[in-house]
Image (cartoon, rainbow, N blue to C red):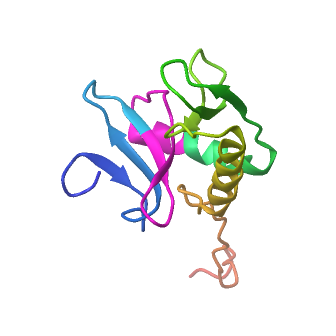
């Protein structure tokens, strides 16, 4: 969580990047911001912990190059949004706003994929370190 206790922020996300925030219902949702600070994508799915939200984001980030979106017209209003369908009834992630033109929405999705792929992994990779040991002692060496 950040200093205010409102959410969990990845390093450097004050302007852009990943951010998981706690919703009024106590669950977590994440968003991705562009370097200029504008929110470009949000997840409608709610997670029980900030760690679950981070793992969901990392999973999406890992497959960024292969993502495809469904572009759909907004029901109430004018515009288009992109949606990446999820395994649940809610989309995995969607655009944070509606775009006036279909082509603009397509371009926004392409920019999202590039931005997502550039994000660093949130969970550090597991490191396997070798512990260098000196020559092992045999029982005959111990006096």
Q: Looking at this rendering, what residue extends furthest in the top direction?
A: 89
Q: Position of residue 76 (x, y in %)?
A: 48, 19
Q: Looking at this rendering, what residue extends furthest in the left direction?
A: 4
Residue visible at 70% across and 31% down? 71
* Stretch in magenta: 30-55
Residue visible at 66% across and 73% down? 139
Q: Quadrant of residue 119?
A: bottom right
Pick the front one: 9 or 94: 94
Residue 22's place in the image compared with 104, above or below, is above
Q: How many numbered markers are drawn?
A: 0
- Determine whether, in the image, residue 83 is placed left or right of residue 8: right
Residue visible at 49% across and 24% down? 77
Residue 44's place in the image compared with 63, above or below, is above
Q: Position of residue 55 (x, y in %)?
A: 55, 42
Instruction: State which quarter of the image contains the C terminus.
Output: bottom right
Q: Quadrant of residue 67?
A: top right
Pick the front one: 30 or 97: 97
Specify whether residue 35 is painted magenta: yes
Specify whether residue 62 is painted magenta: no
Q: Position of residue 24 (x, y in %)?
A: 25, 28
Q: Looking at this rendering, what residue extends furthest in the right direction?
A: 66
- Determine whether, in the image, residue 72 is placed left or right of residue 57: right
Pick the front one: 134 or 110: 110
Pick the front one: 128 or 29: 29
Q: Quadrant of residue 84?
A: top right
- Determine whether, in the image, residue 79 is placed left or right of residue 9: right
Residue visible at 49% across and 66% down? 35
Q: Position of residue 69 (x, y in %)?
A: 72, 35
- Determine whether, in the image, residue 100 is placed left or right of residue 77: right
């Amino acid at each position: 969580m950040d200093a205010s206790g409102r959410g969990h922020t990845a390093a450097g996300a004050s302007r852009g990047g990943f951010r998981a925030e706690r919703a009024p219902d106590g669950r977590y949702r994440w968003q991705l911001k562009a370097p200029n600070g504008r929110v470009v994508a949000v997840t409608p799915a709610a997670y029980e912990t900030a760690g679950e939200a981070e793992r969901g984001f990392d999973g999406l980030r890992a497959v960024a190059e292969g993502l495809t979106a469904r572009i759909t017209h907004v029901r109430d209003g004018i515009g288009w949004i992109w949606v990446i369908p999820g395994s649940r009834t809610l989309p995995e992630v969607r655009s944070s706003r509606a775009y006036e033109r279909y082509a603009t929405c397509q371009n926004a999705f392409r920019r999202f994929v590039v931005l997502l792929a550039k994000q660093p992994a949130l969970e550090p990779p597991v490191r396997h370190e070798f512990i260098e040991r000196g020559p092992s002692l045999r029982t005959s060496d111990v006096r």
